[in-house]
Structures are given as C-alpha cells and as structure tokens.
Amino acid sequence: MRKHSLMIPLLSLCLLLLGFRPALAADVCKVTPDTVSFVETDKSYIRVSCDVQADADVQVTVLLGDQTVYQRNYAKCAEKFQSEDIYLRLDGTQTIYTVCVDFADTSYETQVVRKVSRLTGNTACATGISLKTITGQKSWLSCTVLDLKALEKEDETYPVHASNAYTLGDITFSLSKGRLTATYTPPEDSDVTVASSQVDIAFTPLEARTLGTKRFRGEHTSLDTPVSVGDAAYACVLVQLKVSYTPSDLPASPKVSLEGQSDRWEEMQQSAPDGSNG
C-alpha cells in the first residue's frame, strides 16, 4: 500500500517536469467545426466537439499555415465527439490556425484566431517628446510641448500610445478664452475604454522638469477640464490615461518623439523668466 501511495505524487512531479499543464476550464474555448467556420478566442486551449457517426474513427488536425502542429486519431468515437484539450501557441498579438475534423466521408474545417487577452488598467499617454528628455529620468512616457499663441489660433492633435507598442487614438489640445483643454478620441472600431485620466500642465521649465514625479507643483487636472494659462507662452503637458483594450484590434505605436517638439522645448526654456528655468 505504501508503495502505491508514493506513485501518485511521483507521477505528478514527472508530468510537471515534462512541461505538462492541464488546462483550466476557464482557459478552454469550445470549437464546433460542424456548426461554425470561424472562431476568435483569447483562450490558450481549444476543445473540438461535433456530431459524428457512431463508432466512427475521427481525425483531428490543427494547421499553422502549412505546418501540422497537432494531429490525433480518435478510434471508435461516440456520436457526440469531443477531443482532448489542444494548446494553441500565441505569437505576437494573434495567431491563425486551421482546425480540421475528418471521419468516414465527412470533413469539417474551422479557422481559429488566437488573440492576446484584453489588457486592463494600462497606462497610455500623448506623444510629443520623451519625458526623459525633459526630466532626465528613465521613462517610456512622453509629454507634449505646446506653443500657446499658436494653439489659440488652431487646435493641435497628437496620437496616444501605450508603452511604445500600440496606438490608442488621439489627444486634442485647444485654447479658448485663455483656458487650455485636453480631449481624448478613441480609435474607430476599437474596444478602448478609459477608466481615469490625469493631465499635468507645466507652464515653466522648472515645473516641467518635475513632471511624472511627486515633486510636481504645476497644474493637476483631467480630460475635458479647462485650465487657465494666465500669461504663459508655452506649456509642457503630460497626459496619462488608465485604459483597457484588446491589442490585436489596434495599430502599432505611432512615432513617439515628434518633429518640432525639441525646438519648442528649447524655445520654452529660452523664453522663461529668470528663476523659472531651473
């Protein structure tokens, strides 16, 4: 008895060492090739299920392009066939597989698109100039330098990016009656949602050099909330959005450091009154 009791944990350990990971029910997508020809999923595994002839021999094949990544013959199946859980590897934001089921004189084929899961609670910001250029601190964030006299004549729109990886719409800056406003527009046909926003505005180079830190003492506001610019000629704005999105629905990151932004930063420093340049 004692010998048998040791075999179960030893077997479990061997399976783990071999890389075997049983699929959790929540991580399995059911695929029914006899009823659907296209499936999108963010699950790691699929389970193939369909009606077949009683006692039929069923072959399930999974193709990645022309490469066979899974194939198994299931002998003498019941009329309600169900495969084992089949792992689909994800490369990039999505990977396209073809699932084939063959039995007797019948063949079914379904395209399965494995997509990256929806990302929640991520940070996105407006493009312009690297925050590292302004503050000297290592960061992937970027901020936007605005010429307020030019902005008074015409609104300016800048792409929004997340971690230099995805484009998440645009931020539009407008200046009306001496009040600056930042407005967000999500990408068309996307599932981007904004949980919260933080818009930090520096009107002096000294304030700008503390953007993104607890030492920042400039203006704190949020999207669609106007802030008075006073007699300032320039503003350096850090827009941070807390967003959720599905990466496969979005284009790649825009260019983060934009032409003309470094020049504006130099102009902002040169035009600063004594003592406000740091």
Image (cartoon, rainbow, N blue to C red):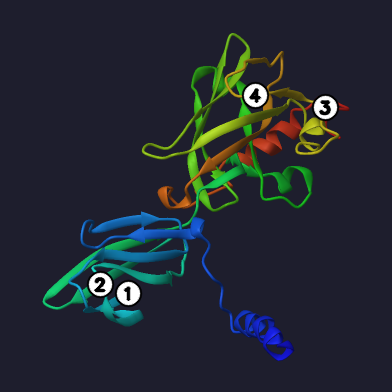
Which residue is the site of mark 1? 62
- Name the residue rendered at 20%, 76% in the picture: 102
Q: CA distance from mark 4 to mark 2?
A: 51 Å
How many numbered discs, if any? 4
Residue that protrudes farthest toward the right in the picture: 275
Q: Quadrant of residue 125?
A: top right
Q: Nearer the viewer, mark 4 or mark 2?
A: 2
Three-letter residue code for mark 3: Arg
Mark 2 lies on a secondary structure that is strand
Mark 1 lies on a secondary structure that is strand
| Residue 151 visible somewhere in the drawing | yes
Q: CA distance from mark 4 to mark 3?
A: 15 Å
Q: CA distance from mark 3 to mark 2?
A: 62 Å
Q: Is residue 201 above or below residue 246?
A: above
Mark 3 lies on a secondary structure that is loop
Mark 2 and mark 1 in contact? Answer it, CB < 8 Å: yes
Q: Nearer the viewer, mark 3 or mark 2?
A: 2
Which residue is the site of mark 2? 100
